[in-house]
Image (cartoon, rainbow, N blue to C red):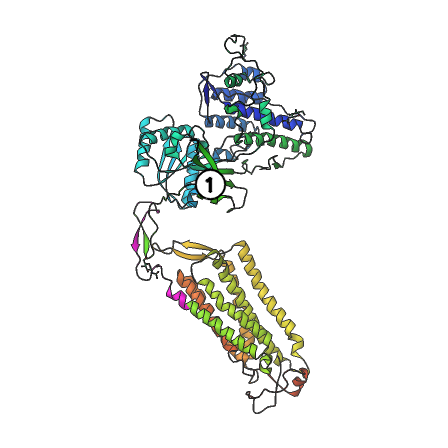
């Protein structure tokens, strides 16, 4: 707040602006035939004189309605009280009477407490949002080591407490935290200056009123403490009194959040038409602006009398500074909130307050009575004409989803050089952090890594595993190529080419998906890891399962003339593979949407190392994915086991049985090892399991030129006319029986 001292009297011109804005809004609302039709709103505006008894009287008068007796007999004295206490007292009183209040300036986070202030609303964001946003800003610039200064009152203490809490969550360390207050003795301020001078932090966050900070800045100027980056709270960053060229040496380049401004059409015209003869109570302001005096009962206006018809047009006075409507926009929203609420109540007997102002701003209140936090990020800059301006370099809008809130964040990077403020520089490759005893964890020494610890070289193990996985993928593709080249030969056609190609395709994916486990975990690789592997494995096993079922069905169908293809033909095969895989896709989709895995720094398993790993998000989902694979592979194993004894050349079932056995063994071994081995070994074990089981799946496929499906008996020959009629030349045929190659 800035006061204007004139005529030896304390006159707050900004409050006159507020009053004029309220009058403007009410006139606009009453003019509007859609809003509150048939109802006119009026106002009673009291001057608290910045004094507690006056504020209480005014509040009482408002509640009781007998203002003459309680309030009007008092006169303003020049003693003033800290404002926040005033607000609190009046708030407590209103709260105890359950009177609705909408404040346009009270920012204390304490007022969000619904138990204590059930009927309190505000159109100014709570300091809580500002503190959190400041912490995010500090983090954004990579400042890990900061100093903190606060006003020793509700505003400073409350705001700083939230900031420190938030900063701690963001991993920011605080070198010092000092409090200042305008009535403190000078020694206290000098001590604070000393602390700042001795500190190594290059960034100072100040949650302070402008009056308190002004005294500190004066001392800093005397001792020439410059070159620090100041980050500020609304109160002082937006202060016209502080933003002066003298202070620029200390505060130059300061950044901070201020309440965003808005355009209110018609307001300027309304202000220009204000006239003391039309609106009572404006004489004092008029005398202030035009430096004249009105005649009263007590005294005649001898020198420079006011006529009352002076024009505000073209006047250079604080009252007419309307280019940036910040607080006034909050007044506007508050008055309109009341009008809309009354409108709702009268028209629909129910309040569901949400409206859009003429300048397009959404207004609503959350469950704590707070409105949406919307700030402008400003940067103090020295303009060419030698004045200090705060230039808007970014916007913050809490109503936007997380991550999009810094709309123009690039803008401010170009305006000033970003200082580095860290306690210790990050360690070079080949060295590691070692905590310093008794100091915050932002301060550490760098000591060389022992053998085998973190270094700038890629881990050998990762490279080997990646090679194996690529090798596997190549082998699989090679087999697929052989299949493809010979795709028209009866042998390949006999080998159930559709399922085989699908199997080869999914196997290639299985090999490749082990690559997502290698390297530094990222958002994407964490998401892909288990899900990609889960889905491709199920696809792979479904194909094997399909093949097993085909083999089984072929030999269970003993009646001559019955056709396997009728019961489990290509359509059914495709459908079953699709159905089995969809279940896994569903599990994975649920996993990714409800509790997705994310990269995470594990500091717990070792005191000296930080292990970068993927947090599973949900262990249940992980085991559901594994469990489903296990379930399918056991079915596959059981079916293949039954089919293994089928006539000699139908030997694929034997291979499948064997490979499923190995598969189950690998994964049964995997689980206890996975649970017990720490860090990178967990990942290595999982990759190994994936590779092992992928390689074994090649095994039953590795003899594609082997005529496996042979159906004895003429009956079967008839069932497949035109397909695989005669044994191919040079293939291995059974010497004892007459063989015909059938397509199964
Ligand atoms: C309200 O209506 C009157 C009469 O039409 C007009 O003179 C006045 O400017 C309007 N006020 C506002 C705030 O729009
Ligand atoms: C208010 O002041 C008037 C005159 O100054 C006096 O007559 C009246 O009694 C006072 N009222 C109260 C409630 O003090
Ligand atoms: C690892 O870092 C050291 C020191 O920074 C450097 O000399 C060496 O060449 C680096 N090795 C690799 C493989 O980048």
Local crowd size for mark 1, using a 10 Å CA cut-off: few (<14), some (14–19), many (≥20): many
Along the line of sight, which residue is nearer the eye, 367 or 84? 84
Q: What's drawn in magenta, residue-wise?
A: 437-464
Tell me the quadrant of ligand 2: top right
Along the line of sight, which residue is nearer the eye, 146 or 217? 217
Where's residue 362, x and y in %?
59, 38
Task: Decide if residue 128 is in sight here.
Answer: no
Q: Residue at x 64, y 30 (%)?
A: 342
Vertically, is 595 above or below 504? above
Which residue matches tag 1? 133
Where's residue 109, x and y in %?
48, 35
Vertically, is 636 above or below 210? below
- Residue furthest to the bottom in view is 736
Task: Decide if residue 614 is in sight here.
Answer: yes
Where's residue 315, x and y in %?
53, 22
149 left or right, relative to 573 = left
Query: Magenta segment, principal secondary structure?
Result: loop
Along the line of sight, which residue is nearer the eye, 200 or 629? 200
Question: Residue 152 occupies which quadrant of the picture?
Answer: top left
- Residue furthest to the front in view is 384
Queried whether the magenta region covers residue 458, the answer comes back as yes
Queried whether the magenta region covers residue 374, the answer comes back as no
Q: Residue at x 54, y 28 (%)?
A: 322
Q: Residue at x 38, y 62 (%)?
A: 458
């Amino acid at each position: 707040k800035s006061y204007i001292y004139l005529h030896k009297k304390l006159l707050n011109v900004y409050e006159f602006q507020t009053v004029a804005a309220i009058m403007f809004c009410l006139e606009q609302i009453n003019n509007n035939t859609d809003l509150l039709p048939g109802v006119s709103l009026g106002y009673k505006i009291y001057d608290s004189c910045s004094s507690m008894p006056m504020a209480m009287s005014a509040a009482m008068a408002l509640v009781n309605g007998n203002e003459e007796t309680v309030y009007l007999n008092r006169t303003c004295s020049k003693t003033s009280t800290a404002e926040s206490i005033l607000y609190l007292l009046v708030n407590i009183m209103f709260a105890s009477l359950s009177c609705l209040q909408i404040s346009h300036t009270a920012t204390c986070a304490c007022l969000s407490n619904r138990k204590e202030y059930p009927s309190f609303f505000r159109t100014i964001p709570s300091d809580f949002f500002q503190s959190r946003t400041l912490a995010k800003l500090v983090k954004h610039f990579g400042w890990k080591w900061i100093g903190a200064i606060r006003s020793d009152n509700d505003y400073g203490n409350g705001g700083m407490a939230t900031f420190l809490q938030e900063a701690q969550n963001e991993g920011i360390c605080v070198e010092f935290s000092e409090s200042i207050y305008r009535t403190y003795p000078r020694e206290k301020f000098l001590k604070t200056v000393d602390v700042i001078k001795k500190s190594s932090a290059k960034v100072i966050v100040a949650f302070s009123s402008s009056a308190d900070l002004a005294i500190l800045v004066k001392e800093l100027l005397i001792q020439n403490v410059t070159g620090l980056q100041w980050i500020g709270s609304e109160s002082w960053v937006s202060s016209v009194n502080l933003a002066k060229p003298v202070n620029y040496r200390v505060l130059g380049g300061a950044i901070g959040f201020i309440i965003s401004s808005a355009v209110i059409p018609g307001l300027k015209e309304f202000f220009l038409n204000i006239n003391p003869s039309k609106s009572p109570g404006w004489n004092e302001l008029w005398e202030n602006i035009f430096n004249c005096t009105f005649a009263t009962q007590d005294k005649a206006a001898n020198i420079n009398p006011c006529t009352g018809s002076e024009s505000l047009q073209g006047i250079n006075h604080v009252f007419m500074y309307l280019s940036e409507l910040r607080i006034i926009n909050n007044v506007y929203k508050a008055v309109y909130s009341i009008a809309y609420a009354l409108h709702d109540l009268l028209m629909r007997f129910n309040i569901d307050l949400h409206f859009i102002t003429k300048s397009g701003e959404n207004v609503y209140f959350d469950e704590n009575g707070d409105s949406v936090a919307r700030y402008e990020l400003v940067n103090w800059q020295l303009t060419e004409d030698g004045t200090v301006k705060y230039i808007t370099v970014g916007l913050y809008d809490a109503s936007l989803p997380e991550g999009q809130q810094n709309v123009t964040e690039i803008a401010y990077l170009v305006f000033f050089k970003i200082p580095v403020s860290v306690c210790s520089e990050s360690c070079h490759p080949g060295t590691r952090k070692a905590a310093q005893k008794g100091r915050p964890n932002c301060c550490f020494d760098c000591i060389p890594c022992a053998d085998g610890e973190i270094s700038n070289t890629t881990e050998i193990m990762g490279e080997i595993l990646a090679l194996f996985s690529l090798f596997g993928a190549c082998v699989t593709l090679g087999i697929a190529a052989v299949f493809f080249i010979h795709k028209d030969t009866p042998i390949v056609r006999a080998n159930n080419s559709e399922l085989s190609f699908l199997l080869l395709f999914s196997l290639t994916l299985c090999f490749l998906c082990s690559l997502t486990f290698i390297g530094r975990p990222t958002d994407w690789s964490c998401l892909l890891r288990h899900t990609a592997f889960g889905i491709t494995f199920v696809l792979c096993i479904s194909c094997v399962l399909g093949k097993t079922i085909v083999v089984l069905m072929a030999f269970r169908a003993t009646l001559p003339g019955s056709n396997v293809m009728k019961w489990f033909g290509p359509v059914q095969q495709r459908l079953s593979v699709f159905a089995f895989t969809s279940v896994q896709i569903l599990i994975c989709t649920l996993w990714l949407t409800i509790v997705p895995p994310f990269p995470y720094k594990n500091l717990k398993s070792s005191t000296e190392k930080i292990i970068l790993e993927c947090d599973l998000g949900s262990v249940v989902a992980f085991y559901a994915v594994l469990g489903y694979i296990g379930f399918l592979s056991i079915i596959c194993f059981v079916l293949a086991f039954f089919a293994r004894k089928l006539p000699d050349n139908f030997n694929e079932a034997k291979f499948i049985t064997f490979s499923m056995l190995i598969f189950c063994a690998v994964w049964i071994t995997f689980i206890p090892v996975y649970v017990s081995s720490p860090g990178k070994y967990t990942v290595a074990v999982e990759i190994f399991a994936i590779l092992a089981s992928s390689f074994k799946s090649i095994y039953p496929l590795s003899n594609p030129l082997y005529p496996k499906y042979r159906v004895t008996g003429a009956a079967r020959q008839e069932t497949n006319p035109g397909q695989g009629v005669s044994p191919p030349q040079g293939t291995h045929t059974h010497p004892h029986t007459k063989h015909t190659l059938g397509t199964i």
